[in-house]
Image (cartoon, rainbow, N blue to C red):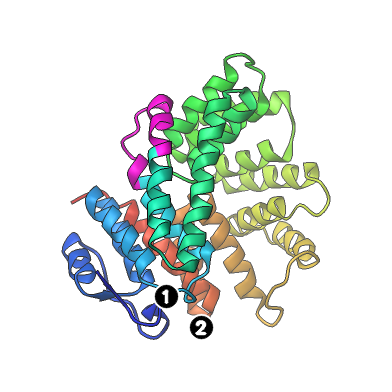
Amino acid sequence: MEAADGGDRGDSFKSRRIDTVSDVLTVLDGRYSFSEALDCVAVSEAAENWQLVERAALAALDAVDAGAKSPETLSEAAWQFVRQKLRTTGGLTSLERALPVVSEELDRLASKSGRNQRLALSSVRSGVNDLALLLADASPTSYVKLCSLLRKRIRRPELGIIAATRALNPDAANAAALNTRGAARLDLEQLTKAADDLERAWAIEKSHYVANTHVRLFMLRSEHTEAVRWSVVAVDAAPPGDTVALKVMAAAALAADDQAQLQEAIATLRAHEKHDSEQPDRWVLLLAARQFMRDGLLDLARATLDDLLDLGTYGPATKLNEELNRELKRRQPPN
């Protein structure tokens, strides 16, 4: 495979449209940027062409020189490779068997890579080993952490539900397990089951974690006023200076067009985070779009980013837009 010279060519020219498997093959047979290789991953995944997913993920790692990308950015491609390797694991037992094999494969890739690629692969390998350690421990606390990692790192919320349920077997009143299982069910849009988990969790522990997950539930139901109400509960329950609850409040308030709560969230956030004070509208829209993406509210993220990009060129918005486009491609049904 032939990567672009001097790192990610996407920094110097507009990336090509990559919408079909044919486009992917054309790109990977020639010269490509890091961003284009990640687009190839998303299109291949949507088409359920798993061999091509692996090829594109490896291409992304090869598409940069030693100084062109940070390890954090490169880890996105490395995690794509891991997800492809673990996609056929049908349960926690089969996952436990597969993890050491994937860890060894990451070691092999790192031995043939440049410095930054090695750092990224080593970081992801540590994440894979964390999964294995949590599985081996098999305590309720470990199963709760495992559920969260299965959701976020390898996009397997269905396995996360199994892990959280195991945490609940010895203790049905484990609020953290109920909350994380509810979050995993929201990933799968199992809203009724998620609501039951969250109601039970709230009855046991009125924490900002559970309140924030309630916000996501009501956002997915398009009940934005109720989402704002729960975001206020989350902020009130959170420790001082907790910016996660404030960001959730800002996003919910923007969706509900609740200017009072939006301004309250923004005023507090200004004291904790740097932002573009000359363009406050851009800062707020970017914050909300990121939160919508984290919560899986892609339609809201798309609309918010469109509004943001209409305000003019803005580097952080352009980067987030690329990430959103890849996520939308990944979720397209196969042709």
Write the residue at 40% across / 78% down: 7
Residue that appears at 38% across and 70% down: 35
| Residue on which disc 1 sits | 65
Can you give x and y, in whole percent of width and height, for residue 53 in the image? 28, 54
Q: How far across and down, in percent of the image, does residue 100 sit?
A: 42, 37
For the residue pair 133 and 151, the one nearer the viewer reads as 133
Helix, strand or loop for disc 2: loop
Say if 168 sits above or below 186 in the image. Answer: above
Image-based side of 129 in relation to 85, left or right = right
Please give the residue where the numbered disc 2 appears in the rendered image. Answer: 312
> What secondary structure is found at the residue carrying circle 1?
loop
The N terminus, quarter of image:
bottom left
From which residue to which does the magenta span run?
A: 84-100
- Depth check, mark 1 against mark 2: the one in front is 1
Q: Would you say the magenta stretch is mainly helix, strand or loop?
A: helix
- Residue 168, image quadrant: top right
Check disc 2 and give the amino acid type: Gly
